[in-house]
Image (cartoon, grey):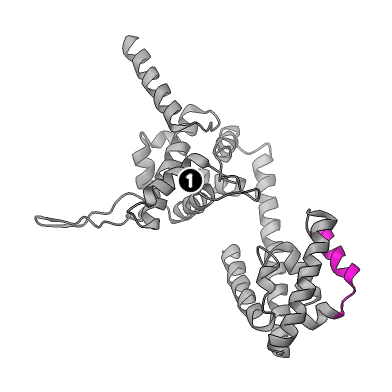
Amino acid sequence: KLTDTSSTFKKKLSADLRVIFPGYNTIFSDSTSKSSIELLSQYPTPQSILEAPKENIIKIFLNSSKKGIIWSENTYSKLFKVANEAKIIGLPLDGLAVKIASSITLIKTIQSEIDTLLQKINNFIQSETFPESIRANIELIDSIPGIGQLTAITIIAEIGDIDGFLKPKHLVAFFGIDSSVNQSGNFKGDNNKISKRGTRIGRRALYSVALASISNNRNGVPINKVLLDYYQINLKGKKPKIALVAIMHKIINYIFAVLRNQTPFEQRDPKIHKQMFLENNSLNKVA
């Protein structure tokens, strides 16, 4: 809920910046990133940035990011240019500047609460009273690309004991991404949506993992190339939402496998995985 509230204020901040500071969104990949928030908390308008000593802004970049002096110098140059342009084409609304400062204060306050809660959660999980088996399962889920520690904690908290799910499709139904039934008498619909039964929080966490899994990191390397390729194949002739649900199904299979086998995730090429599956089946038949 705190993250949702923070996101609401971040959207409002971005909207206000487009009015008072045109072009600002081209400076940072995320105009509500830590570097951007720290900058705007001290210099919320184009005029204040133009009047600020260069070394002060460079210091903000160096303290709030890990990108070094070259990035900081280049970012300042782009920022100064955009601030000059915004001074001419932006709307000089003092009230809006106050609103920006207010939004930033709220965002920082909420983020502080989030950080405190995350620290408490982490301390609890690392404590001696926390069950070792659950801690191990969190680490197993965390080994899957695209899943962070908080998401792993959320998923494990929602699933509980994996022994209650005999097959991956049972886990699919639990997350509510199985197809809903669209049937009346002899009529059977072919445009079914996901049922959305089961855990709403778990489904939301799974959706976030799916989006992360088909994206690239800062260096342009896919988070999970196998899933990204699978997503792009499914996009052919299908809607993006349907292709994303297919990714969510795959992730559930990953989760079920690592928890059932109690082994960390190992990414394999689909052809190699298929060959290993056939070999294992052959050995089981011989045995």
Q: Position of residue 237 (x, y in %)?
A: 32, 53
Q: Nearer the viewer, residue 90 or 85?
A: 85
Q: Is residue 261 above or below residue 116?
A: above
Residue 28: percent from the left, percent from the top?
Answer: 69, 65
- Residue pictured at 48% horizontal, 32% vertical: 269
Magenta part of the protein: which range?
A: 51-64
**Residue at image point 66% right, 53% down:** 118
Q: Is residue 101 above or below residue 7?
A: below
Q: Quadrant of the C terminus?
A: top left
Q: Amino acid at mark 1?
A: Leu
Is 85 a magenta residue? no
Q: Residue at x 79, y 58 (%)?
A: 71
Query: Quick check: 283 left or right of 15?
Result: left
Q: Quadrant of residue 145?
A: top right
Q: Quadrant of residue 249?
A: top left
Residue position for label 1: 228
